[in-house]
Amino acid sequence: MPVVRARDLSKSYGSGHTRVDAVKCATFDLEDGEFLALLGPSGSGKTTLLTIVGALLEPTSGQVVIGDRDVTKLRARERTAFRARQIGFVFQSFNLVPYLTARENLTIMSSVAHLDRAEVGRRADRLLEELGIDARRDNLPEQLSGGERQRVAIARALATDPTLILVDEPTASLDTALGIQVVQVLGEEIKKRGKSGIMVTHDSRMARFTDRTISILDGVLTADRPRAAIHSRAR
Ligand SMILES: Nc1ncnc2c1ncn2[C@@H]1O[C@H](COP(=O)(O)OP(=O)(O)OP(=O)(O)O)[C@@H](O)[C@H]1O
Ligand SMILES: [Mg+2]
């Protein structure tokens, strides 16, 4: 059974002559254990679609089912609780807490998701090490580079052991080698620990580290390809 079923999702911002149809009738499934890239240029609707799937933004119309829950039907409080337990979200702007250290930005998630503090602490230490930011654990976000902040945000999303990982442009502040490493850590986390994930990117080079790519253009899902097809196209 798919982990995510997105059906006929549409989102419009504003009204009248300022109205923007950011996502138009998007339908797709995310299979259990799958790592999916959502690929498209700036302004194509990637963040809008990802935040709808992550139950952070209500669609204008359409439905998102995660597991057996229709998240578009949940009340605000239920939705928040569901999100904290099930979904790890990495925002394009990172959204780190400025007065907490890198490690504290991870461990604070134990109270948000009502999880065991010691267990989240152990996961935090492992993730800081795997993502190469262990030496920066006691720094505040303002004392970190853009790429380090991004990796802290990724580690934070994984710290609660969510079943679904949603990542918005995880490589935008990273050079190519580090970007590839970060996407590989995400892929490994998904494969090793039985999770599923969607990664938003405008960079087709990053998409080749995922199982499948969906392309989006002007709010419309245009193509759905397994990894092999992307490889042969790139050659
Ligand atoms: N809160 C908002 N109010 C009005 N329009 C918005 C809002 N958020 C996004 N938009 C518009 O919706 C469209 C899609 O935006 P979105 O942020 O989803 O694109 P994106 O693919 O994530 O772009 P980027 O790669 O630059 O992050 C754009 O035209 C954008 O200007
Ligand atoms: Mg975006």
Image (spheres, helix red, strand yellow):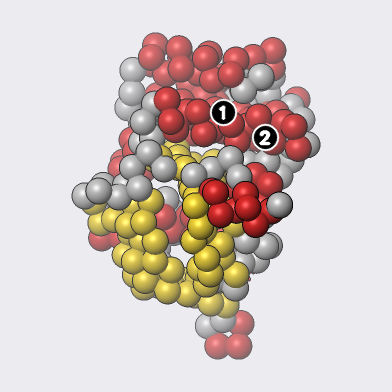
User: What residue is at 39 percent from the left and 11 percent from the top?
Assistant: 118
Place of residue 93 in the rendered image (x, y in percent of width and height, measured from the top left): 64, 45
How many angstroms separate mark 2 from mark 1 (CA)? 9 Å
Read off the residue under disc 1.
185
User: What residue is at 75 percent from the left and 25 percent from the top?
Assistant: 143
**Position above or below: 208 against 85:** below
The amino acid marked with disc number 1 is Val
In the shown orientation, is residue 5 left or right of residue 13? Answer: left
Kindly check if marks 2 and 1 are in contact, taking CB atoms under 8 A apart as contact. Answer: no
Total marks drawn? Answer: 2
**Position above or below: 203 against 24:** above
Read off the residue under disc 2.
180
CA neighbours of label 2 inside 10 A, class few (<14), some (14 to 19), many (20+): some
User: What residue is at 39 percent from the left and 66 percent from the top?
Assistant: 27
In the shown orientation, is residue 150 left or right of residue 86? Answer: right
Place of residue 43 in the rendered image (x, y in percent of width and height, measured from the top left): 65, 66
- Name the N-terminal-most of marks 2 and 1: 2
User: What residue is at 54 percent from the left and 20 percent from the top?
Assistant: 127
